[in-house]
Image: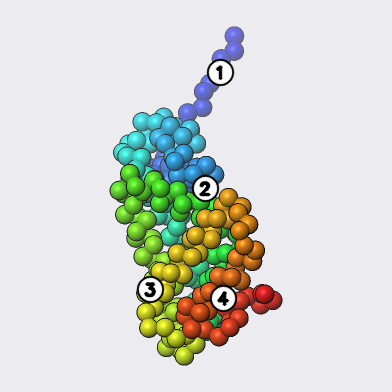
Amino acid sequence: MSSTIQKRAARKTPAERAAEIADAAREIALEQGLSAITLRNVAARVGVASGLVAHYQPTVDALVAGVFAAIVAEETEEVSGLLDGLPTPSERLGMLLETLMDGSRLDVTAIWVEAWTLGRRNEALAACVREQMDAWQAVVQRVVEAGIEAGEFETSDAPSVAWQILGMVDGLNAQALVRWDGVSNRGSHLAHAVEGMVGAARDSLLPAGGD
């Protein structure tokens, strides 16, 4: 008579389990969206009971907010690192526009768009959205201010210009999510618009080989 011995799941420290749950929620968000983050879905991804997830994440709203903040902050840090390696403000602003418009970050764009909607009823998420929008504005504002100081840009209101640039980037990328071709060469049109906003030389913000 044979018997089957069920292998018990390895015990993990609280820190390891919390990290595992956060990673699972992040994967779900990037694959299916923030609205797909539920205790049941996260538990199934990890392979544990929903009650265990609830022990580490008492509210789904807080879990969603934390996942959003982690994903967006990582992108902000990554882009800031790319900009730090460039010598001039014009090159940094041009690279910023290029990397945000090249279509490689649409998964994060989708997270942003969904967060703006869900944040209407999830105050924890709304607070994180505001915080991360402030962080992005600070990145752009620093580049614009550096350009003014270097004599490459001419504008008297760097904070407002940074806000307007982000608004255009967000709008164009949201359009790209549904593959709307209202205008071709979004990146070139945006670069030329930003050149006028910051008082930069014509074509100075286009990538090499740009139109």
Question: Looking at numbered disc 4 in the image, what kind of residue is underneath it?
Answer: His
Residue located 47% across and 80% down the image = 198
Q: Is residue 87 above or below residue 26?
A: below
Q: Which residue is mark 3?
A: 160
Q: Note whether residue 10 is visible.
A: no
Q: Which one is closest to the eye, mark 1 or mark 4?
A: 4
Q: Which residue is mark 4?
A: 192
Disc nearer the start of the sequence (1/2)? 1
Secondary structure at badge 1 equals loop
Secondary structure at badge 4 equals helix
Secondary structure at badge 3 equals helix
Q: Which one is closest to the eye, mark 2 or mark 3?
A: 3
Left or right: 50, with 58 as reference point: right
Q: Could you give the CA–CA distance between mark 2 and mark 3, rounded to whole angstroms?
A: 31 Å
Q: Which residue is mark 1?
A: 4
Left or right: 58, with 77 as reference point: left
